[in-house]
Image: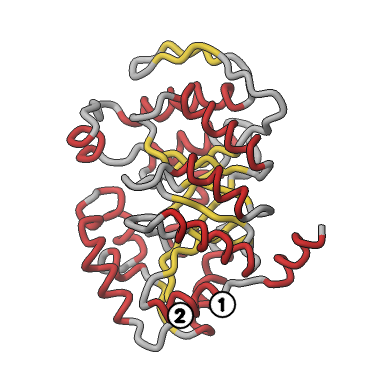
């Protein structure tokens, strides 16, 4: 299973983000990912990171759709790919009503229709074809002139039944958050695969985002996540996943334990249908170092440097 790592960018000087990217390249990770969380701009930052740490695939997890028109987003993503030459996974998502309405001032009315119309516009634009969408939530008409740029893969941060159906129909796969092996096997993977099959699309990518800590004190990182991300338990789509996985909120999703325990849980994710792991290390600095090293592949790094 391919493994990427989510870089820590919140409140971090940009030079430190670059250092994280270089470490990921040294450790042999397949990809580096950035979130869009009110700090550094993910696509702009990845352009610099892709040059500083060449050979890595690049991904966003995820960029909210409402604040970025699909024509603008497509131009940014194609520019990133052309500037770095790296494969790009363009992860997008609806975000949540309090963010979209209270922070950005957009209406969150009919979000599933918005996601469908957004993807209907974004897909042709990334392939440098004409978008011709006159929807109820957006209008997108035009093309992007980006000679030589390769189309990014489009992924969606989706969990609800309707958003998963749209994701399987109009994108290359999903970036899941908070979802464990049970949710993947019994719900996310079959829902996506059915939608993709009906739409005549290839088998979807299942990028499984996981908070992981290699530690001798599993309660430490779990309690930290519960304290800092407890508000996620109030979001209905997340609530449904927690219930399905039989965990008590965000803290219960953390994969925390020794190396053997962590490896076993990740194998369960792969058996459940995950095609890629998106590692999000948590814990003390020492625990995060152990976690990054557990999933390292120096041989892969060496092969890239000698290529």
Q: Residue at x 40, y 77 (%)?
A: 285
- Residue 255: image quadrant is bottom left
Label 2 packing within 10 angstroms: few (<14), some (14-19), many (20+): many
- Up the image or down, 260 lies above or below 134; here it is below
The location of residue 252, given as percent across then percent down, is 31, 70
The location of residue 236, given as percent across then percent down, is 25, 48
The location of residue 154, given as percent across then percent down, is 55, 37
Disc 1/disc 2 C-alpha distance (Å): 8 Å
Q: Which residue is mark 2?
A: 214
Please name the colour scheme applied to the rendered image: secondary structure
Residue 225, visible in the rendered structure: yes
- Residue closer to the observer: 147 or 138: 147
Q: Which residue is mark 1?
A: 294
Q: Residue at x 49, y 40 (%)?
A: 43
- Residue closer to the observer: 304 or 214: 304
Lateral position of residue 14 relative to residue 295, left or right = left
In what quadrant of the picture does the C terminus appear? Answer: bottom right
Q: Residue at x 49, y 64 (%)?
A: 279
Q: Residue at x 62, y 48 (%)?
A: 51
Residue ranking furthest to the bottom:
216
- Up the image or down, 28 lies above or below 41; here it is below
Q: Earlier in the sequence, mark 1 or mark 2?
A: 2
So how many labels did they put on this image? 2
Q: Which label belongs to residue 124?
A: none
Residues tagged 1 and 2 counted as in contact (Cβ below 8 A): yes
Residue 273, visible in the rendered structure: no
Lateral position of residue 146 relative to residue 163, left or right = right
In what quadrant of the picture does the N terminus appear? Answer: bottom right
- Residue 160: image quadrant is top left
Lateral position of residue 304 relative to residue 202, left or right = right
Residue ranking furthest to the right:
307
């Amino acid at each position: 299973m391919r493994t990427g790592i989510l870089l820590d960018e919140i409140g971090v000087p940009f030079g430190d983000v670059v250092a994280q990217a270089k470490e990921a390249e040294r450790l042999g990770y397949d990809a580096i990912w950035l979130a869009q969380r009110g700090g550094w701009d993910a696509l702009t930052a990845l352009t610099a990171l892709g040059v500083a740490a060449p050979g890595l695939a690049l991904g966003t997890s995820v960029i909210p759709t409402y604040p970025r028109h699909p024509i603008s987003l497509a131009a940014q993503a194609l520019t990133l790919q052309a500037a770095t030459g790296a494969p790009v996974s363009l992860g997008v998502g609806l975000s949540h009503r309090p963010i979209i309405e209270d922070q950005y001032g957009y209406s969150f009315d009919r979000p599933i229709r918005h996601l469908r119309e957004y993807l209907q516009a974004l897909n042709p634009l990334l392939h440098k074809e004409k978008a011709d969408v006159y929807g109820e939530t957006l209008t997108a008409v035009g093309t992007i002139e980006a000679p030589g740029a390769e189309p990014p893969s489009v992924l969606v941060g989706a969990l609800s039944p309707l958003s998963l159906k749209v994701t399987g129909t109009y994108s290359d796969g999903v970036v899941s958050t908070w979802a464990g092996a049970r949710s993947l096997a019994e719900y996310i993977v079959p829902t996506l695969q059915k939608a993709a099959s009906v739409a005549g699309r290839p088998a979807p990518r299942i990028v499984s985002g996981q908070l992981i800590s290699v530690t001798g004190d599993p309660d430490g990182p779990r309690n930290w996540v519960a304290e800092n991300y407890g508000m996620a338990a109030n979001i209905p789509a997340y609530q449904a996943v927690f219930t399905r996985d039989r965990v008590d909120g965000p803290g219960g999703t953390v994969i925390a334990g020794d190396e053997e325990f962590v490896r076993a849980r990740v194998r369960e994710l792969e058996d459940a249908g995950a095609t890629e792991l998106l590692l999000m290390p948590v814990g003390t600095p020492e625990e995060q170092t152990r976690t990054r090293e557990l999933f390292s592949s120096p041989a892969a790094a060496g092969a890239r440097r000698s290529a």
